[in-house]
Every structure is written in structure tokens, then in C-alpha cells.
Amino acid sequence: MVNESLVLKAYEVAKERYAAYGVDTDKVLEQLQNFHLSMHCWQADDVNGFEVQAGDLSGGIQSTGNYPGKARNIDELRADILKAKSLIPGNHRLNLHEIYGDFQGQVVDRDEVELKHFQSWIDWAKENDTKLDFNSSSFAHPKSGSLSLSNPDKAIRDFWIEHTKRCRAISEEIGKAQNDPCIMNLWVHDGCKDNSVNHYIYREHLKNSLDEIFATKYDNMKDCIEGKVFGIGLESFTVGSHDFYTAYAAKNNKMLTIDTGHYHPTESPADKVSAVLQFVPELMLHVSRPVRWDSDHVTLMDDPTLELFYEIVRAGALDRVHYGLDFFDGAINRLGAYVIGSRAAQKCMLRALLEPAIIRQYELEGKGYQVMALLEECKALPWAAVYDMFCLKNNVPVADDFIACIDAYEKEVTSKR
């Protein structure tokens, strides 16, 4: 167990160190308290969901590993989510995919989903002081194939249009019930495995489908749209590319989703922030850790993730960005994955908030080496003491004390599944 008095002493030292650079750590802790992650439900069960007629994962989505103890039903998943939330400082949202409806053992096709299939989620969220976000689900279905909203077959296209319309309507009711907008992400896997000669036709279909889907305006939900470089099995062409969705979002005043795993490995998702915020109202992040491809490894406090949060803070865009997580690792304890990934994202935000503003002023004044010097010094400042204090204030385990909590939960709960 971490000694509380040592945490308090270390924080006072850190507070003084940062004050010398003009940074108020008490204020930063208040800002971090208002930093709400949207935790993804699908880490708990490897993206299986609760459909009775569930199909195998498709659309380039793949969860690897078979660590024992994954959630097998809605009650186990909810229990795991609550346990994870109890080990993560702050209060965080939960992001649902449509396939996680409470279907009560009934066969409900994707174009038949209704609010009633998520009413128990709304009730559960209220009971547990949790706001919900939502996603349509175009994968793992007999009609998924390689094309959904862009399919040249109108019947299939209409099926997925209806599905997405219903998801938006559900999101609206969720937002109304929680008195806070429910953010609904729209990502479809559509693409081609080999060379395609009909790019324009597919993208025209996708644009027209989106136009029809978004024709109904809502007050209690927000739409965000997400592109991708490629998916496994759809390597040669992606209909909903980044260019496509960036243009659509800018033209139609939609929120754009930046998934850190959906770019070429040499691209910087962080650099997109200041570019697209010139033209779109808000951003949704899906933070994961791509290893050579969109592998959705657990988020860590690595350089790309740090830079992403630095760019948000430097842009003064805290109120224009929403923070979703999107990793799913079936090879390790899934509760551990939640806690490590969530805390890593928080630490990245904390370090960005603690960056002295004088650094930006130095650059504007042409003080190049001073910028470099301070950036290097900031790496060694005692930010970890500030995060420990944040955990202490939120009555969650400090430092690595959460490991024992997860081990106990595994022994008492998940190992018996």
C-alpha cells in the first residue's frame, strides 16, 4: 500500500516545482476531474456483444488472445465495467455498440433494434452515475459482407441505412434521459480486398446514405463520423477514407472521429487536431495503440498518445474534444487492460495540462533553444506526484495498488467463469 503521507508530501514538492513555471497544480487537478473518458464496453468481452444470432467478427476487426474470464453476458459485463470504474480516478462515460443491447434472448435483427433494447442500460447508467455514448454496428452480420452503406445492392444498403437511423433515434433518447448529449459514432468497414475500379460509385452511395441518415435532426445526440486506412481482408480500398469523412464533416458541420489506429504508421494523429479543428465543430477521439496496423493494443503513455493530448491543450480545445477509448486485448486480464489504458490516457492529459504556457510564448518570440530546453525539463518534472494526488482525492488505489485489487477480483470472480 502506498503511504498516504508520502503522497501528500510529494504533491507539495511537485506543487512548488510547477509553480516556479507558472503552473497551478490545484487548478490542473480540477481540470483533470472534468476530463471524462468514454470507456468502451467491448474490451470486456472481445467485441462479442449479446445478439442471439451473433456472427463472427468481420470488417477488419480482430481481437487476439484467449485470456480466461471474459464477460459472457450483460450482467457480467456490467459488473466488470463497474469494477474497472472503481479503480480509475474521476467519473467516466460508457460507450456502447448496438450489438450490446439487452435482447433478452430474442432474435432482433439490426434493422429492428429499438429503444426498449437499451432501456435497461439507461436505467443502469442512471443508478451508477454514468453517461452513455453509442455506436452503430455494421460488422459481424450476414449482410455485412465487404460493403454496407456503400453497397450497390439497394436492399442491403437500405438495411444498413435503417439500422443506422434506428441507432441515431436510440442515441437521441439516451441523451434525453441522461440530460446530456449522447455521442453516436458512425464507422463502417466498407472496402475491397483487391483492386477496385468503382471507387466513385461506392463513395457516391456512401455519401447518399449518410445524407439520408442525417436528414433527421436531433437535439439530444451528436453525430461523429470515422474513417480508416484499411481493414484486414479489405486492404486495397476503403470507401470511407479519411479524405472522404473529413470533407463530409467539414461540409456538413459534423464531428470527426480521430482513431489513433486508423492512419498509416508514419502519419501523426496528433497533427490532425489543429488541422481539422479549423473546419469542424468538435472532435471525437478513439484512443488505442496500433502496433504496425490497427491492432488496438492497450493504450499506454507513449509518445504518440502524449503528443495527441499536448496538441489538444495547446490548441485550447479542451471543450471541443471528446475522449473515447478503443482497444481490445484478449491476451491479458481485461480488467487490467481497462485500468491501464484509462489511467494512461489520464496521465497523458495531465502532462499536457501541466505544460508551462511560457514554452509557447518562447516559440513565438523565436527562442528556439529555450523551447527545446523547457520541453526536455518538463519530462523530468514530478507529474507522477500530481497523478498520485489525483488518485488519492478520488479514493481509488494509488500507483500500482490497483494490481492487488484486480488480482483479487480475478480470483473471486472472473476465474470462476
Image: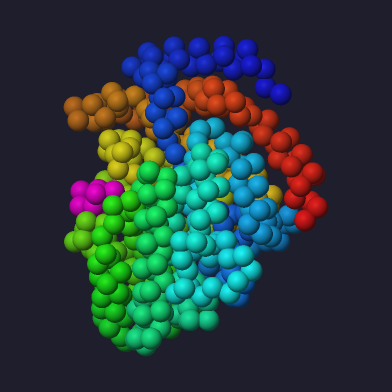
The rendered magenta stretch, by its main secondary structure, is classed as loop
- The vertical placement of 359 against 10, above or below, is below
Instruction: Read off the magenta span.
Output: 276-282
Left or right: residue 21 versus residue 65 is left
Left or right: residue 225 versus residue 250 is right
Residue 190 locus on image (x, y percent): 40, 75
Q: Please tell me which residue lies in front, 188 or 400.
A: 188
Question: Which residue does the image show at 46% across and 49% down from the upper left?
Answer: 132
The mark tally for this picture is 0
Question: Which residue does the image show at 79% across and 44% down from the upper left?
Answer: 412
Q: Quadrant of residue 242?
A: bottom left
- The vertical placement of 396 against 85, above or below, is above
Q: Please tell me which residue lies in front, 23 or 127.
A: 127
Question: Which residue does the image show at 67% across and 22% down from the upper left?
Answer: 2
Taking the image as drawn, is residue 285 in sight? no
Q: Does the magenta segment cover residue 277?
A: yes
